[in-house]
Amino acid sequence: MRAIGLMSGTSFDGVDVALVETNGERIEAFGPSGYRPYTSAERRVLSQALADAVAIERRTERPGAVAAAEGVVTAAHAEAVERFLREHGVGADDVDVVGFHGQTVLHRPEAGLTVQIGDGLALARRLGLPVVYDFRAADVAAGGQGAPLAPTIHPVLLRGLDLPRPLAVLNLGGVGNVTFIGADGELVAFDTGPANALMDDRLMRETGEAFDRDGAISASGAVDEAALARLMDNPYFGVEPPKSLDRNAFSAGPTEALPLADALATLAAFTAETVVRAAAHLPKPPALWIVAGGGARNPTLLDLLRRRLGADVRTADAVGLSADALEAQAFAVLAVRSLRGLPLTYPGTTGAPRPLTGGLLARPDA
């Protein structure tokens, strides 16, 4: 099947698009990928929705800016697909399904609650394509964490690559997550802690820029070790996996009084140190760490990871994958797996009681 995957992560930067030909268990071919950034106005709506979403007690509630943000997310994803199809000369008839993750605004698995906004049916009708969406709810309803989801697909994406085992795939979006793939196929995954979210929020607030391009600002600052120690003084890092995080689970409070460059340097060191703590929860030390997501574009962060992990750290691009499109590719495969009733989550990835499928299907003629 030819599937388009869509991903809008916790960095709130935009929509990643990827085309994959797959049966859900292997990749027949990787197609092109694309990106549609959110505008400044859209990011403001999403940021307000994130604040307003803390009042949600039932998944169907859309308080404050959350309702408007759902419309923004749906329209942005539709535009992203339409532009992608035009730019790459792909006809809608050549696509079998769209995997639509939506935008997470609240994640409280301990309360049986995870909310991803985005109208799957409206997207299906606008695109004229079947859309699989709401990937996380079934896992959370069964007592799982509902996150991370992409780890189920990481072994599929890596199949055929001559890489050492065990290895770790580290996705550094707004929140970080790690996937451990053992020599025998053992799969362990969990959220590591904040990745880019705290840095991006500080930068947006002070400069209006979405991210620290090439890690230049953080490279010019000095790490405040006392502030770093306070950031690391959080019980989450000692909790055994499976575990997952809400984007707002951590505060940059200890760095607020620091100049921008020092704050970003300290927050980058914080991200790296959370990965070091996460490594202690893995079954074995990985022979290789593969970094994807926005963090793969930050040389300062990559250097910190290499020094603090004392390990071989490479970007996804460097091993033959796509650092930018990896998550979108994963949701293309997850959509096909959902259609086939295959597992999206496992006990080792989300703490699900058993391998579970999930996702809802919206048809354009419904």
Image (cartoon, grey):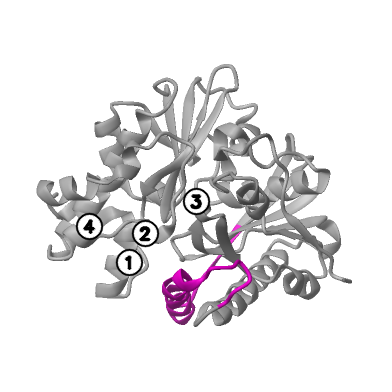
**SS at badge 3:** helix
**Mark number, residue 201:** 1
Answer yes or no: is residue 125 visible. Answer: yes
Which residue is pictured at 32% across the width and 75% down the height? 208
**Amino acid type of the residue that numbered disc 2 sits on in the rendered structure:** Ala
Q: Disc 3 marks which residue?
A: 110
Between disc 3 and disc 2, whose residue precedes?
3
Mark 2 is surrounded, within 10 Å at the Cα level, by few (under 14), some (14 to 19) or many (20 or more) other residues, namely: many
**SS at badge 1:** helix
Between disc 3 and disc 4, the foreground one is 3
Between disc 3 and disc 4, whose residue precedes?
3
| Mark pair 1, 3: CA separation | 26 Å
**Magenta part of the chain:** 34-62
Residue 341, position in %: x, y? 80, 43
| Mark pair 2, 4: CA separation | 11 Å
Along the viewing direction, whichever of 246 and 258 lies nearer the viewer: 246
| Mark pair 4, 1: CA separation | 10 Å
Between disc 4 and disc 1, whose residue precedes?
1
**Amino acid type of the residue that numbered disc 4 sits on in the rendered structure:** Leu
Q: Disc 4 marks which residue?
A: 264
**Mark number, residue 197:** 2
Name the image quarter holding the C terminus: bottom right
